[in-house]
């Protein structure tokens, strides 16, 4: 996220109506996290003060709807987690998944550790380090990333972490199709797989969240857990929480 030019102290708005539909019974936890971002997140330079008035629509809900792509009981690594977007949002929304927040910078991991403790998220672990340093020792069903790097570079960091059948879910902007077209040849050289661009959260966030999904089809560690294969019709998968 980019820093704004406003002074800290922008007012965090109340959760919009769609937040209740997206977060359900985890809305109080999401609200507490939003408060942490608007306060400590701004003071520590993790988000710009200009982002505070639009935290819900542009950031929290935008990230939360990616849970539509993650099946019950999956293991997820959020690469370059920063202030916890999208990994911490997904972890608080989905207590059934195991989330690892992978972040190299100390000041960010300190914030993430404090946030996880404050929110009581027993399914979320903070790990300091770079994705490439975890190659060969960390395997997961999904890798998530938002505003971390161009797709070719992100794939180089992320695909070695995936079990066969696992997916990279990269949150991208309006140029997602063009970025994928430019990077797809390089991505396929890294590891065979299937790439597509999907939009999630229609009717919940406007615009819908754009995700570049790269699903690997070659061996690169243990096979993906059974949970990551539980797809429902139209590509949607079983969710592990009450609405």
Image (spheres, rainbow, N blue to C red):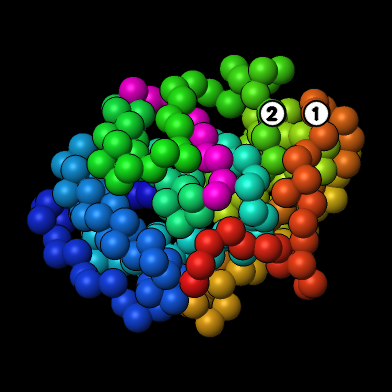
x and y percentages locating residue 47 in the rendered image: 29, 47
Is 29 positioned to the left or the right of 198 in the image? left
The answer to whether residue 207 of the structure is visible from this angle is yes
The circle drawn on residue 12 is: none
Element type where label 1 sits in the image: loop
Q: Is residue 21 left or right of residue 107?
A: right
- Could you classify mark 1 by the number of other residues whose Cα lies within 10 Å: few (under 14), some (14-19), or many (20 or more)? few
Q: Quote the CA–CA distance across marks 2 and 1.
A: 7 Å
Label 2's element? Answer: loop
Q: Which residues are magenta?
A: 96-106
Q: Which mark is residue 139?
A: 2
Residue nearest the observer in this picture, 184 or 227: 227
Out of 78 and 141, give the one closest to the viewer.
141
Q: Is residue 189 visible?
A: no
Q: Is residue 54 magenta?
A: no
Q: Residue at x 71, y 53 (%)?
A: 213
Q: How many marks?
A: 2
Residue 202 placement (x, y as % from top left): 57, 78
Horizontal relation, residue 6 to residue 223: left or right: left
Q: Residues within 10 Å of mark 2 (few under 14, many from 20)?
A: many
Quarter residue 24 falls in:
bottom left
Along the horizontal axis of the image, is 165 left or right of 161?
right
Where in the figure is residue 39, as x and y percent of width and height?
17, 49
Identify whether 223 is placed above or below 145: above
Q: Are marks 2 and 1 in contact (CB under 8 Å)?
A: yes
Q: Is residue 99 magenta?
A: yes
């Amino acid at each position: 996220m980019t820093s704004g030019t406003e002074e800290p102290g922008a007012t965090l708005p109340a959760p919009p109506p769609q937040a209740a539909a997206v977060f359900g019974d985890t809305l109080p936890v999401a609200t507490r996290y939003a408060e942490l971002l608007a306060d400590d997140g701004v003071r520590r330079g993790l988000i710009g003060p200009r982002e505070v008035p639009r935290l819900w629509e542009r950031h929290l809900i935008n990230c939360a709807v990616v849970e539509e792509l993650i099946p019950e009981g999956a293991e997820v690594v959020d690469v370059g987690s920063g202030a916890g977007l999208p990994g911490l949002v997904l972890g608080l929304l989905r207590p059934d998944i195991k989330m690892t927040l992978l972040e190299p910078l100390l000041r960010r991991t300190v914030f993430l550790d404090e946030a996880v403790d404050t929110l009581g998220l027993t399914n979320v672990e903070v790990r300091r380090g770079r994705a490439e340093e975890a190659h060969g020792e960390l395997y997961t069903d999904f890798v998530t990333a938002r505003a971390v790097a161009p797709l070719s570079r992100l794939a180089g960091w992320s695909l070695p972490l995936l079990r066969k059948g696992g997916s990279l879910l990269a949150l991208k902007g309006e140029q997602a199709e063009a970025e994928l077209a430019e990077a797809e040849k390089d991505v396929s050289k890294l590891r065979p797989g299937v790439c597509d661009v999907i939009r999630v959260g229609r009717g919940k966030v406007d615009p819908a969240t754009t995700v570049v999904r790269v699903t690997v089809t070659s061996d690169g560690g243990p096979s993906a857990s059974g949970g990551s294969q539980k797809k429902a019709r139209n590509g949607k998968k079983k969710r592990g929480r009450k609405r």
